[in-house]
Amino acid sequence: MTAIDSTPVKSPPVDACVVAGSDHPRPDGQDRYTIREVAAYTGLSAPTLRWYEEIGLMPDVERSHTGQRVYSNRDLDWLSFVRRLRLTGMPVADMVHFAELVRQGEDTYDERRQILEQTRRDVLVRVAELTDTLVVLDAKIDFYTGAHQAPERA
């Protein structure tokens, strides 16, 4: 007879948008990671991971019987999503608010969708600005490339 631990595992609620692809390779079959492993997989430092937990961006991280943090694949998926939100330029306070909405459950889907739609619009504006900047940079590069090839005048 096998004894099964019926203690519920506390994982942050994660919706489907979070698990759309993995940015970091993970060992096959593994779903328990130390803070050091998570730091290596995500590129985030251990102090940053602790801070994310402290401010509510990474809530309810499971603990081992000795009190050490134990992260799951869902936690890694969430951190991947948070990293993408950071790339959009979203302020940390807004990400914490989004995380709180996730914890509140399905009743907040509309608000979360609105936040992500606004973030998407903001990203599109930034992409357009960066595209314009690339055009200017390419023109300058072409100018300087041509300047070296032009014969000197006496």
Image (tube, rainbow, N blue to C red):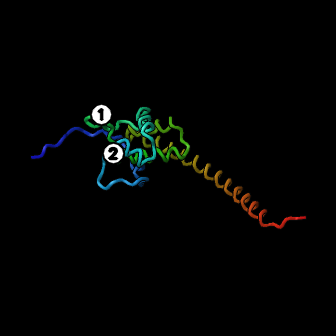
- Give the quadrant of residue 58: top left
- Identify the amino acid type marked 1: Gly
Residue hosting label 2: 33
**Residue farthest toward the front in the current orientation of the protein:** 154
What is the C-alpha distance between the residues marked 1 and 2? 14 Å
Question: Could you tell me which residue is drawn at 35 percent across and 46 percent down?
Answer: 74
Q: Position of residue 101 (x, y in %)?
A: 42, 38
Q: Position of residue 31 (x, y in %)?
A: 30, 48
SS for tag 1?
loop
Residue 110 in sight in this render? no
Q: Position of residue 62 (x, y in %)?
A: 31, 38
Mark 2 surroundings: few (<14), some (14-19) or many (≥20) residues within 10 A: some
Question: Could you tell me which residue is drawn at 37 percent across and 46 percent down?
Answer: 37
Residue 115 placement, left or right of 34: right
- Give the quadrant of residue 50: top left
SS for tag 2?
loop
Residue 9 in sight in this render? yes
Q: Earlier in the sequence, mark 1 or mark 2?
A: 2
- Identify the amino acid type marked 2: Tyr
Question: Could you tell me which residue is drawn at 40 percent across and 40 percent down?
Answer: 102
Disc 1 to disc 2: CB gap under 8 Å? no
Q: Position of residue 144 (x, y in %)?
A: 75, 60
Mark 1 surroundings: few (<14), some (14-19) or many (≥20) residues within 10 A: few
Residue hosting label 1: 67
